[in-house]
Image: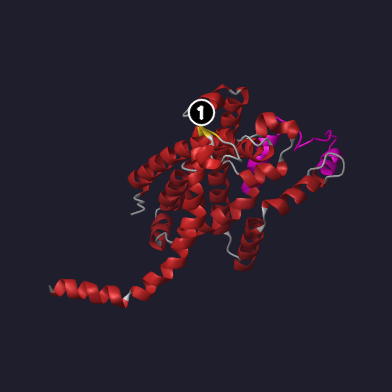
């Protein structure tokens, strides 16, 4: 009885905090869960005039149709390949930058470099795309002008289907590396300094200290970041690809999200676009569950 009274008093005492959650929950219901009713279009031959309740029900026909589209397999491969490359490069580059910055003893230089590499993270892909298109232009871009000094022919970085996927990975790493570097620098501060002292007593040089003390010290956060990123392997980055790609690189640069955009908003094939989006979401949910299981097993990370 007393325990129930204490719980009741605690709930009343914390009720203002609970009320603060109400606006967020309402927005979540309106903008996140409300639009999910549109998933029904994936199982219909959707007609804008007839609406959800008047359109013909076709079951799984839309899913069977999209699997027969010749470009779907290539688009799926592009999505996985680009996302996988982003995960790998997005892991290696920030770790290397963090290790190099950690070795700097001049704090002013260290903070300046850290700020410079962090700045692109705050810029939108709309702005960055305009900058990159100018920089990488085959006629007037500064990169090709530099290459011409070494006798290298101009490269159409954003118009060459073989080069474009790697440009997506490179520009993604350039934008996001600063944020990842901060995470790994924070992890480096948690390493016990006595471990370095013990390593020095044992005669370890800087390289040995890095290999035997620093890397094992940040390994849990590296594993955690890698495993968590697996859940987003099908998110190759719509904003980036949409702002940088063009019809010349559709064969290697088109991803699931851009395909859904074209089919849904440009070609008005709402049911097919919804089916592709739902197909991607189901696979993403499976990958997220697997990634959280791996994060729990190898890094001790749990959501609840």
Q: Quadrant of the C terminus?
A: bottom left
Q: Is residue 109 visible?
A: yes
Q: In this rendered view, identify the residue nearer to me: 127 or 46.
A: 46
Determine whether, in the image, residue 88 is placed left or right of residue 19: right
> Residue 201: x percent and y percent?
40, 57
Q: In this picture, is 63 found above or below 33?
A: above
Determine whether, in the image, residue 83 is placed left or right of residue 209: right
Report the magenta residues as a range. Answer: 144-173
Q: Is residue 233 visible?
A: no
> Residue 99: x percent and y percent?
54, 53
The residue indicated by pointer 1 is 63
> Residue 36: x percent and y percent?
48, 46
Which residue shows up at 61% across the image and 65% down it?
111
Residue 138 quadrant = top right
Q: In this rendered view, identify the residue nearer to me: 233 or 66.
A: 66
Which residue shows up at 71% across the image and 39% down it?
245
The kind of secondary structure element at disc 1 is helix
Direction left: furthest residue? 1
Which residue shows up at 42% across the image and 67% down it?
21
Determine whether, in the image, residue 124 is placed left or right of residue 212: right
Q: Report if residue 150 lies within the magenta region.
A: yes
């Amino acid at each position: 009885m007393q325990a129930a009274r204490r719980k009741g008093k605690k709930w009343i005492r914390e009720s203002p905090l609970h009320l603060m959650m109400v606006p967020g929950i309402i927005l979540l219901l309106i903008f996140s869960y409300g639009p999910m009713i549109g998933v029904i279009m994936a199982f219909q031959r959707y007609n804008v005039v007839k609406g959800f309740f008047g359109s013909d029900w076709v079951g799984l026909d839309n899913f069977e149709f999209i699997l027969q589209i010749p470009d779907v397999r290539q688009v799926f491969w592009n999505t996985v390949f680009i996302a996988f490359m982003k995960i790998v490069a997005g892991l290696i580059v920030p770790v290397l930058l963090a290790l190099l910055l950690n070795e700097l003893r001049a704090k002013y230089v260290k903070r300046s470099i850290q700020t410079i590499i962090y700045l692109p993270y705050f810029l939108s892909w709309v702005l960055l795309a305009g900058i990159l298109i100018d920089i990488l232009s085959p006629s007037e871009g500064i990169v090709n002008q530099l290459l011409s000094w070494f006798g290298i022919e101009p490269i159409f970085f954003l118009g060459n289907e073989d080069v474009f996927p790697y440009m997506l990975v490179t520009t993604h790493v350039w934008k996001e590396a600063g944020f990842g570097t901060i995470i790994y620098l924070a992890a480096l501060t948690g390493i016990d300094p006595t471990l370095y002292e013990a390593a020095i007593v044992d005669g370890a040089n800087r390289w040995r200290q890095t290999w035997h003390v620093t890397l094992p010290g940040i390994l849990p956060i590296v594993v955690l970041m890698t495993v968590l990123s697996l859940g987003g392997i099908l998110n190759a980055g719509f904003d980036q690809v949409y702002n940088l790609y063009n019809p010349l690189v559709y064969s290697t640069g088109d991803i699931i999200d851009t395909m859904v955009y074209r089919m849904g908003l440009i070609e008005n094939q709402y049911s097919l676009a919804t089916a592709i989006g739902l197909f991607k979401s189901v696979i993403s949910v499976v990958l997220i569950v697997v990634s959280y299981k791996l994060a729990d097993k190898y890094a001790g990370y749990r959501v609840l």
